[in-house]
Image (tube, grey):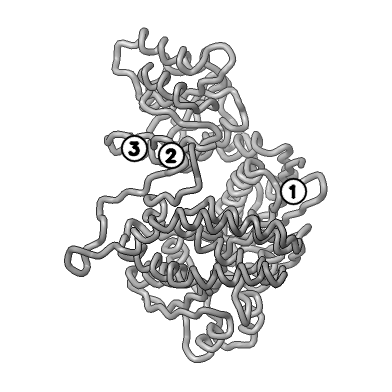
Amino acid sequence: MRILYADDQSDVRSLIQLHLERTGHHVVAVANGEEALRALREHTFDVLLLDEQMPGMTGSEVWRTIRSEQNAPSPVAIAVTGYDTEEEQDRLLQLGFHTVIGKPFHWKSLDATLRSLASGKAAPPREAGANVTVLASRPTDALARVGGDAELLARMARAFLRELPGRLRDLQHAIRHEHGDVLASQAHALKGSLSLFAADGAAAICKELQQLGKSNDFARAAVSFAALEQTIAELQPNLRRYAAYKRTSGPGTPAHPKTKPRSPGSNRK
Amino acid sequence: MANILVTDDDAATRVMLRGILKKAGHRVATAADGLAALRAVQKQKFDLIFLDIWMPKLTGIGLLGRLHGEKHIPKIVVMTSDQTSDTVLDALRGRVYQYLTKPLDVTTVLATVESALSISPEVPAIEVISANSQWVELMVPCERSVVGRVQSFLLHLDVGLPTEVIEKVGYAFRELLNNAIEWGGHLDPNLKVRVSYIRTKQMLMYRLDDPGQGFKLEELKHAAINNPHHDPMAHMQEREAKGMRPGGLGLLLSQQLVDELVYNEKRNSVILVKYL
């Protein structure tokens, strides 16, 4: 697709431009709203990527001007903003932007939006409240990681749940008996498995425990461990739901064929 | 179809990899620790090993050392969530094919398998000249898949740098390495590009020496770096006319992404510097 990208931050502009070129698009990158308007009068584009925080004309001012000027059908406009609050999103969407992408750029959400535009389908909807919490495991993420194969995810979850009580016991034992190395390596291993299920919050606590193990700080490790238990308890219903999945159709039929990977952090900072 | 060994002490990861690889038609064996993996390798011929680093009994790095004397050494893909330069350097010295960061996903796994298995045995290995955390120097064959592989190692050396810096330098480096391999080495795997990575307190530097004859900047009509100021799309028309893929921004952008980009006179050696 032919993309016009306006952003006053030259390094970000370069990075995005290079990325878009690499993914097969033709890109013209400009540094402000005036240049964007000039480029638009001279060339045609399929997509406009407009930064909202530019000095001079903002992205939405550029967009408003284009819409009032152009007789031909306007290209699709995507707003890019560093203030990615819900109010700001609503305001931009009401101005007729197709979608809003937060800055710093989330590659996957940018790519997904452009892919869906190129294939003529509607863009994936913004995920409500995705910037609220990272503590809960996000089912679409874990499922996306295995290509939508719910049956495989179920087997993984069962394997994980089988090992989990023993691993928590080992961690607790390492803290109680002050074995720093053991604590660090056990926490590291558990972190790896948790991240498979996109349980970022629990994985972050494991990372903390790993460091506390390395520095032999067992008092703080005990506190972190309690937080880990709590977080994992909150995750359990999700994990059990994964584990309980049973294939209903015949063998060889992919589970959840329509499940599409969704980029979870589109508006997360 | 290939024979693949998955070595990881985490059961969920073993289940995941086995599931993905079997579905793609490969034969898969698993091992839960390094010793079990070593026994498996001694008993059976594998094309590829997915190897975790932190495992009980014998670590992944330990296993690499033990494999050294074996007759047939499978291609090895190291996977770890661990971001220490020591692990990366050990992996490099252990002639690891690629370095993957956990958690893995189906796309990465299958792409890695495909690239590892499709590389011809004629393609020479990456030669390690120096591998300490401040100075890494490699001789890499002029072959496409090498770019992602070299980057998979070098990016993980940049421990403690902001993601933004790593991304920018990574993009610039990839552009330049691609150029060196494609234009300098004409994609001939028997020719080599020398890649040096040097990290000091205040800067990060890459140097690339390609085996080509160099080039003249004025000749690059298909590159955006030569666009006249009033026509930012001139190179696109040139590329379309020549039937080239979209692109041509590499030099221009690399220049903007790092602090210094310096060529030698012939332009077959380039240094890129990012101040920290």
What residue is disc 3 on? A124
Q: Is residue A250 left or right of residue B106?
A: left
Q: Which mark is residue B205?
A: 1
Residue lying farthest right? B201
Q: Position of residue B45 (x, y in %)?
A: 47, 86
In the rendered image, residue B186, in percent from the top left (x then y), is placed at 55, 56
Secondary element at tag 2: helix
> Spatial distance from mark 3 to mark 2, Cα to Cα?
9 Å
Amino acid carrying mark 2 in the image: Ser
From mark 3 to mark 1, how far is it between C-alphas? 40 Å
Q: Secondary structure at mark 1?
A: strand
Furthest residue to the top? A68
- Which residue lies at the image location 64% right of the left edge and 68% below the top edge? A185
Q: Position of residue A62 (x, y in %)?
A: 46, 14
Residue at horizontal 57 percent and vertical 88 percent from the top: B71
Regarding residue B125, the answer to whether it shows in the image is no
Residue B79 falls in which quadrant of the image? bottom right
Q: Which mark lies nearer to you, 3 or 1?
A: 3
Q: Tell which circle, 3 or 2, labels the residue nearer the N-terminal end.
A: 2
A233 or A164: which is nearer to us?
A233
Left or right of B135, for residue B47: left
The C terminus of chain A, quarter of image? top right
Q: Nearer the viewer, residue A135 or A35?
A: A135
Q: Which residue is mark 2?
A: A109
Disc 2 vs disc 1: Cβ atoms closer than 8 Å? no
